[in-house]
Amino acid sequence: MMNKSKNCFLSIFACLIFSNNISFAETNHSQWPIFRGDIGLSGYVKHIPQKFDLLWDFKTSSPIESGAVIGGGLIFFGNIDGVLFALNEQTGSKVWERKSEAGFAAAPLVLADKDKSYLFVGDDDGVFHALDALTGKEIWSYECNGKITSSASYFRQDDQLFVVFGSYDFKFYCLNASNGEKLWQVETENFINGTPALSDKKLLFGGCDSLLRIIDLSTGELKHSVNLESYLPSSPVIIANTTWVANYNGTVFSVDIETGKIIWKYQDENNGAFVPPLAVNQSFVVAADQQGNVHVIERSTGKLKYLLEVSGRVSAGPIIDDNNVLIADESGYLTLFDLQSGKEIVRYEHGPAILSPLAVCGDRIYVGDDNGNLTVYQINED
């Protein structure tokens, strides 16, 4: 039975690990294997539902901040008590759990490579874990000297799979996915909070030293270092040759990846801290600040189109489609806005504070909350 499940899992993921270029048309896959849904971290999906019903929820012992990833019929997430869970996607029943010595703030990464299925995740003690995704058993681990809030991403080179992530020890790591051996590392001048964004042969990440680094994937060589004026607690977004990233002083930047030049910058007049990741579609960049404001910015010009308000502070990044944006807040609401008009379409009371990144996968929305619930909503468009 396990061999049959394993073969199914590997088959499902085969199409996901051989391309680092994920276009808008390809991101609404039936899996959500990585933080923000794709390696560019766009937060983009084909369709956000306007109506949805509770399907099931799963209760854990402590708040969920890490966010869920989905693949091979399983859902993976951790809580701040240091427990990792794998649930059956259809029923919500527990497949396995694994206790760590430290909590999890980073969302996992789930991948299949050759004859193995992997779950990668870092913990608050600075240990990066590579587990068998089907059983939860450890394959290898790598110890850093600072906690890991950065979710991992991945790339393939010379038929080998590599994982990349940052740490609070002022280092960014590239490790061989099969054995944990280090390929390269980049040293910084302060903490690395966010998840790296990848495109083609380049990797981008920011940190608390205010620098956006553009790195050559194969060698770890620094191509450009762009000073963005303040802490970069969030993750960048990459589409084609452009990246967008926000800083702690309320500024959103558009940067050319090839030259490292700033194309435009948008300044929040209230200097609200942008901590959640951005969401980007063909027309707009959406940034949520910690004061409960949602800034809808024109992608081409950097000009503000609308300033939207939600019920509370926003910790989870927006999810965007071509026409709408979905916001989760710490007052426990899910709010959907029309991007063209700025009008609120629906405001749904989930209940507990939502700190965890949202996942929108197939016809479902996955929400982790401050009460330790992983809740799954089923789309209902009737």
Image (cartoon, rainbow, N blue to C red):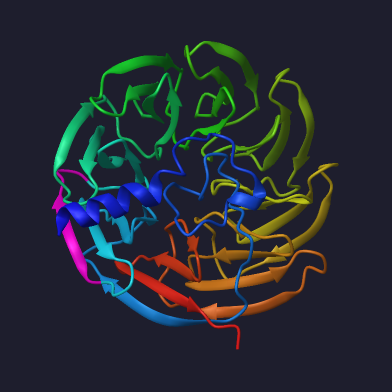
Residue 241 lies left or right of residue 198; in this view the side is right
Give 215 or 306, whichever is nearer the viewer: 215
Pinpoint residue 340: horizontal percent, then vertical percent: 82, 65
**If the image is split into quadrants, where does the C terminus sit?**
bottom right
**If the image is split into quadrants, where does the N terminus sit?**
bottom left
Residue 165 lies left or right of residue 326; in this view the side is left
| Residue at the image position 26 percent from the left and 28 percent from the top | 178
| Residue at the image position 16 percent from the left and 59 percent from the top | 96
- 275 lies above or below 147: below
| Residue at the image position 64 percent from the left and 61 percent from the top | 46
Pinpoint residue 5: horizontal percent, then vertical percent: 23, 56
Pinpoint residue 75: horizontal percent, then vertical percent: 32, 60
**Main SS type for the magenta part?**
strand
Q: Is residue 208 magenta?
A: no
On the question of residue 123 being in view, the answer is no
On the question of residue 357 being in view, the answer is yes
Give 46 or 341, whichever is nearer the viewer: 46
Give 260 or 177, whichever is nearer the viewer: 177
| Residue at the image position 57 percent from the left and 39 percent from the top | 40
Q: Is residue 94 magenta?
A: yes
- 133 lies above or below 55: above
The magenta segment: 93-102
In the figure, residue 174 lies in which quadrant? top left
Residue 115 lies left or right of residue 220; in this view the side is left
